[in-house]
Image (cartoon, rainbow, N blue to C red):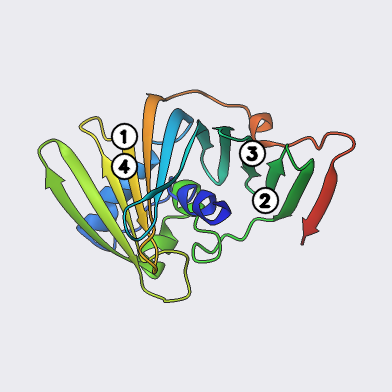
Amino acid sequence: MKIVLVIILSLITHQTLSNSPEYDNLTKKLSLLNDVQADFVQHTFDGKGTLLQTQKGVLNLKQPNKFRWESQQPYEQLLISNGDTLWQFDEDLEQVTLQKLNKKLSATPALLLSGDTNQIAIEYDIYSETLQDETHFVLIPKQSDVLFDRLRLEFDGKHLLHRMVIKDEVGQKTIIRFLNIQTEQNYPNSKFEFIIPSGIDVIRNQ
């Protein structure tokens, strides 16, 4: 589950590098996701298609490198980055883990959503297709030591990311749908800071 959260939160930026039409098109669409809020519903299936878990929550993004991924059901968990530090807060466990944000996508794929798109062309092969008014991108890692085999990003006719599909090497599939997308939220940087509550165990992976 923690791996899925890290992968999901890896896909937005504002920097551009002309490598290919697919790359340029993806970069433009990702750049529209700055200061965005969306509800999400996440379904995880095993290799045989059996539903393993469903989660719901809220995602907030601010470029560059700031995100807040808050799972609310069936249990509460918060993953938050201010661009330098990554916090993972498990309220039920009364525990927070913090570490320096690794900005290499293969180490912290969450930065595909909120990091440097220059790295996308370096670390992934990109393919795209247009279906009616939607545009779909498939990202395949160039290296084998990553968390997933392929990642599919589906943008609607308004150029907003509305669905992601992640497949790993054992056939497990995670589908995330983004709903009620709101843009131009003008978030203050303080929204992406985490104040550690008193009495909480702190684990530092620095």
Say whether residue 14 is left or right of residue 71.
Answer: left
Q: CA distance from mark 1 to mark 4?
A: 7 Å
Give SS at disc 3.
Answer: strand
Type of residue at label 2?
A: Asp
Asked whether 94 or 7 is in front, the reply is 94
Q: CA distance from mark 1 to mark 2?
A: 26 Å
Q: Do residues under tags 3 and 4 come within 8 Å of each other at their CB atoms?
A: no
Q: Residue 29, which numbered label? A: 4
Query: Mark 3 Cα within 10 Å, few/some/many (few <14, many 20+)?
Result: many
Say whether residue 137 is left or right of residue 41.
Answer: left
Kindly report which numbered mark, 2 or 3, lies closer to the viewer in this rendering.
3
Query: Mark 1 Cα within 10 Å, few/some/many (few <14, many 20+)?
Result: many
Q: Do residues under tags 3 and 1 come within 8 Å of each other at their CB atoms?
A: no
| Residue named by callout 1 | 160
Q: CA distance from mark 4 to mark 2?
A: 24 Å
Q: CA distance from mark 2 to mark 3?
A: 16 Å
Image quarter of the C terminus: bottom right
| Residue named by callout 3 | 78
> Residue 161: x and y, percent?
33, 38
Kindly report which numbered mark, 3 or 4, lies closer to the viewer in this rendering.
3
Residue plotted at (71% across, 42% down):
89
Kindly report which numbered mark, 1 or 2, lies closer to the viewer in this rendering.
1
Dot placed on the residue nearer the N-terminal end, 2 or 3: 3
| Residue named by callout 2 | 84
Dot placed on the residue nearer the N-terminal end, 3 or 4: 4
Residue plotted at (51% across, 41% down):
63
Q: CA distance from mark 3 to mark 1?
A: 23 Å
Give SS at disc 4.
Answer: helix
Say whether residue 158 is left or right of residue 147.
Answer: left
Dot placed on the residue nearer the N-terminal end, 3 or 1: 3
Type of residue at label 1?
A: Leu
Type of residue at label 4?
A: Lys
